[in-house]
Amino acid sequence: MSTAATAPAAEITLDTFPKYLLHNAARFGNRAAMRHKDYGIWQSWNWNQQLAEIRSLALGLQALGLKRGDRIAVIGANRPRLYWTFTAAQSLGATPVPVYADAVAEEMAYVLDHAGVRFAVVQDQEQVDKIRSFAEKIPLLTDIIYDEPRGLADYDPRGLHAIADLQRKGEALLKADTGLAARWEEEIRRAGGDDISVMLYTSGTTGRSKGVMIRADAAVKAALDTAVFDKLSEDDSVLAYLPLAWVGDHYLNYAQGYVAAFCMCCPESNETVAQDLREIGPTFYFAPPRIFEGLLTSVTIRMEDAGWVKRKLFDHYIKVARKYGEAILEGRPVPLSGRLSYALGKVLLYGPLRNVLGMSNIRVAYTAGEAIGQDLFSFFRSLGINLKQLYGQTEAFLYVTAQKDGEVRADTVGPAAPNVDIRISDTGEVQFRSPGMFTGYFKQEGATEETLTEDGYVKTGDAGFFDTDGQLKIIDRAKDVGKLRSGALFAPKYIENTLKFFPNIKEAVAYGDGRDFAAAFINIDLQAVGNWAERNNIAYASYQELAGHRQVYDMIARNVDETNLRLSKEPIMAGAQIKRFLILHKELDADDGELTRTLKVRRAFVADRYAPLIEALYDGSTEKYVETEMTYEDGRKGTVRATVRIMDAKVHPAAQLVREAAE
C-alpha cells in the first residue's frame, strides 16, 4: 500500500488531490497514471507526464483568467484532458463542476447558470452547440474550452479555445519564466483542505438537481479510508467509463486513483467499453446493477444461440457454481467432490466466461446506485468474481456502507464503511455521518437544513434496518414504501428488482400504495427480446410493435408468475404480489424526464405522465389507448400512439400460509 497521510520529504499534509499529484510524481514518476484508447491505440502517461500535462493546463487556464473561487464546468465522456481539468482547476483554488454529457441543452444550461460557472471545459462540438444554444441563460459564462476540434473550425472563435492551445500557452509561460513551475507547486503545497474540491449535482430523482459541495480534506479522507479498506495500491488499475458527473466515477476513479496511485484507463467510446475492458483487464471494477443485468442478458443470448452441447455444459456448470461458487470464493468448507466439479467448471466455463466479460483480473468489484437482485448478484459471485455491494449517496461523497471480503451477503449492503456512523431513526429512515459528507447544497441553505438533523446526521430518505449481524438492509425510498388496503407492506423497488432479474425485462415500475393490489409497468429489453423474436421468426418494425406482440406478453407473463412465486416465499412481501401488468409502448428515457441521468426511475413523474394507464390497471380494463410525446436522439419531439394491452397475473398462496395449512 502507498497511501500515506503525509509526504515525508515536504512534511505537508496530503489534504488535496493536487498535493497527491505532486506526491505520486515524486514516488511513482515512471509508473502509468493514465491510459486512453484513441483510434484503436492505447496511449499512456506516467505520473511525471501527467504532472506536466496538468501544470501546463493549469497555467493556461490561469492566463485565460481562471482564479481562486471560480467555478468551471467539465462536460464530456471519460477523457484524460477532462480528468486533468479537475486537478488543474483545484490547483488554482477553483471548483470543478462536472455536468452530465447526455443532458439536453436546457438541463445543462440550468446547472451552468445555477453553479455560476465562468468557464466550461467540454469534449466536443456537441457540447459547444448545447451551451451556445442557451448562452442567454448562462450570463456569467465567458469562455468555452474544447478537447476535440472536429467540426469547430468555422465557429466564431470569440470565447472559444482549444485545450491544446491553452496547454501550449502554459508551456510557453513556463519557458519564459523559469521559476513559474516552482511557484505553482508552492501554491499547491500552501493550499488548505478547506477549499471546495468539487461540486456534484444530484441526479434529480425528485426534482431539480442540487449542487453538493464536497470539501477537499473530506474528499481525501473518505477516499483514503476505502482505498485502505480494499487494499488498493499503485499496482491496481480501473476502466473509467461511468458518467463524469456522477459521484461514483469521481470517487471510485478520480479520488481513489490519486490516494492509491493506481492507473485510470479511459475507453475509446461508450460503444467499445466491453472490448476495452477485455484489453485492459482491470483489477478494480465498478458497475451499477443495470450493467450487470446487461452482461447477464448478453450471456443468456449467447447461450440460447449456442449448440445443444454447449447449452448442456453451461446449464450443468452454472448449477455447480450456484451450489459451491460463493462458498469457495469466501473460503468456507466445501466437500472435495464440489471443489473438483467447480475446478473443472472453471476450466471449461467460468474462466473463459470471465475472460469474455473482461473480468479475468478483477480483485475487487462493486455495484451500487440501485438495489441489485439477489440472484443476479449471486450469479457473478458464483463465477469467482469478488463482487460486493456498497450503499452510498452524493452527500456522503459515495460510501455509507461497504461489504468486507468474506462477509458478503446478497440481501444486504454491508455494515458501515470505515469511520462512518449510521443510525436508524424512529420512522425507519437511514441516517449517517461520514468523513466525506458534504458541507451543504450550493445556494440552497434551506434544503441543506432539511437534509441535516439537529445533531449533524444526513437524512438519506431511504428506509432500512440492521440485520442481526450488523449489516444494513435497504427496503426502498422511505417515501415510496407504503401499504396495500389489506395492510400488506408495499415496497416497489423490491418488486421491481425481482422482476429485473429476468433478461427479458429491462425496467419495471410497480404501483399499489393505498390500492387493492400491486400492479406493474414493464419495459422489455429490446436486445434480449429482439434476439428471441429473430430465433422464432417473429417480424417486428419497432420497439412498440414488439412490446405489444401477444407472444411477448405470454413470455413476460411467465416472468411475472415466477416473480410472484418468489414474493410468495417472502413473508414480508407475500401480500404484494403483482396482480395485473402491462408492457409500456415506449422505453422509459432520460430525455423524456422518465429517468434521471443515472438511469433511476423518476417514479412520481412516470405516475403523473401515465396516469390513464395506472387507472386502467385498476379499473378492470383489458386495454387502453394512449398518446405519448417523446424526444428523439436529435432533440426533435414526436408522438407515439398505441393501444396498450393489460394482462392479469397469477397470485400464489403465501408460503407461511401453506406451511400453517400443512401443519
Image (tube, grey):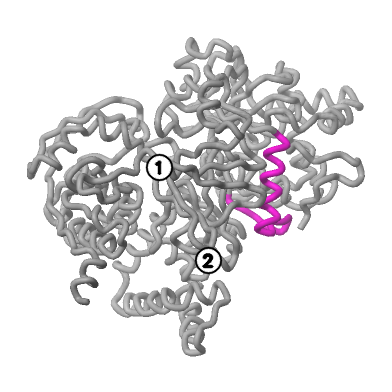
Quarter of the image for residue 560 reads bottom left
Q: Is residue 338 visible?
A: yes
Residue for point 41% across, 79% down: 320
Q: Which of marks 2 and 1 is nearer the N terminus?
A: 2
Q: In which quadrant will I find the C terminus?
A: bottom left
Q: Can residue 547 be seen in this view?
A: no
Quarter of the image for residue 214 reads top right
Q: Is mark 1 on a helix, strand or loop?
A: strand
For the record, the magenta segment spans 216-239
Q: Give the x, y percent position of residue 336.
A: 51, 89
Front residue (pair 466, 259):
466
- Residue 488 vs 569, above or below: the answer is above
Q: Tag 2: residue type?
A: Ile
Confirm or deny contact between disc 2 and disc 1 (CB under 8 A).
no
Front residue (pair 315, 616):
616
Q: Give the x, y percent position of residue 302.
A: 35, 65
Q: In this view, does 372 lie to the left or right of 662?
A: right
Front residue (pair 154, 258):
258
- Residue 135 vs 332, above or below: the answer is above
Residue 385 disc label: 2
Residue labelled with disc 1: 477
Q: Residue furthest bottom?
A: 337
Q: Tag 1: residue type?
A: Arg
Residue for point 14% across, 50% down: 549
Q: In this view, does 655 lie to the left or right of 154?
A: left
Q: Nearer the viewer, mark 2 or mark 1?
A: 1
- Residue 311 vs 612, above or below: the answer is below
Other-residue count near label 2 (Cα within 10 Å), few / some / many at <14 / 14–19 / ≥20? many
Is 232 one of the magenta-colored residues? yes
Q: Give the x, y percent position of residue 376.
A: 40, 61
